[in-house]
Amino acid sequence: PLLACESRVIVTRSPSPQAATPSGAIAPSPSVTADPTPAKVALRPTTGITPAARLLSYERASDIPRIVPQFVLTDDGRVITVDASGEFMQRKLTPSGTAAMVLQAIETGLFDRDASHGRVLRPGPPPLGRGATIFIVVVANGAREIRVTFEPTGQPDDSMYEPSATRARLTALVRGYEDLAWVPATHWVESRQQPYRPAAHRLFLQIEPNVKPSGSPTDAETVWPFFTAIESVGDLVNGPAAPWRCAVIVDDDARALAESLTRAGAITRYGPGSPSAQTDLTWRGSGTLRLQLSPLLPHEPLTCVGAPTPL
């Protein structure tokens, strides 16, 4: 993938002819005007980033084709959770605290092999249609990653389904990952939650040259802060309606892009803890550029292969 190989270079703006000059200094030529575009920089390679190993994770899925991470524990003790506002937060366990949390899951006996535990409908009229809720738990058991999916207990229509001790135990386990107050203080290196700061981000871009944007969004090429042309970034990946371009970029480059978009009013915020940022920009006067930026979690590979494209 084209993830940026050129050296880091900054192009500075020419000074404005209206700027005051100190005594003895040479004033800039009246013919020179300020460049409204941000200084361009070269995208930096991600070669210095090594993903952590996932030991434990919990995700939610539904009938909408999207999986939402809720909890991740990695082999360096990092614990990534999601707060009430949807932001990613980070804490850190000691090595013994990390091992204890993984062992707690393994000792349930429910993570010896991949499994799926759905609900079984009781005899009688079928329930009213509602979207399915699925929990996905992945546990590192020895050299294997065990994946268990299940429909949680405690849903409004539970009475219409057969009870399940297995699903009840899995649900209780997962609920413990949503509130970690039970973890002993001695198991934490850092118990205070802080916004998660990723090492890398995934950038999706889709150019629709014949689709007029709604309103009057910012011009894409004006706010684009990189030397690499928008239409050359990353690799093409298939989307549900049209192809996207996708690239993995380092945190400094993601912040440069987010700051440029924020200054232009295209987004309100994207920084530590942010789950994603999306916006539409004007593409060469009459088209639309769709853009999505999202953080990679510590264990995620530095690739776009297999990554879900924006809806």
Image: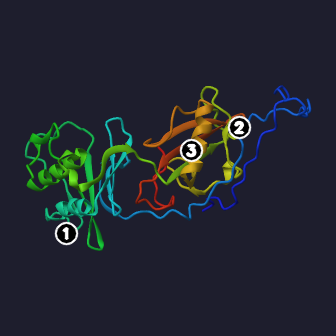
Query: At x 25% / y 38%, what residue is drawn?
Result: 130
Left or right relative to 204: residue 64: left
Instruction: Tell me how far mark 2 sits from mark 3, CA to CA.
Output: 17 Å
Query: At x 23% / y 56%, what residue is drawn?
Result: 187
Q: Secondary structure at mark 1?
A: loop
Residue lying at the far bottom in this picture: please name it.
143
Judging by the rendered image, the residue that carries numbered circle 1 is 112
Q: Residues within 10 Å of mark 2 (few under 14, many from 20)?
A: some
| Residue 151 in sight | no
Q: Residues within 10 Å of mark 3 (few under 14, many from 20)?
A: some
Left or right relative to 32: residue 191: left
Could you tell me if the residues under marks 2 and 3 are in contact, i.e. CB atoms within 8 Å? no
- Where residue 248 appears, as percent x and y from the top left, is 55, 56
Counting residues from the start of the chain, the first of labels 2 and 1 encountered is 1
Q: Nearer the viewer, mark 2 or mark 3?
A: 3
Query: At x 9% / y 52%, what residue is drawn?
Result: 164
Q: Secondary structure at mark 2?
A: helix
Q: Secondary structure at mark 3?
A: helix
- The circle on residue 222 is 2
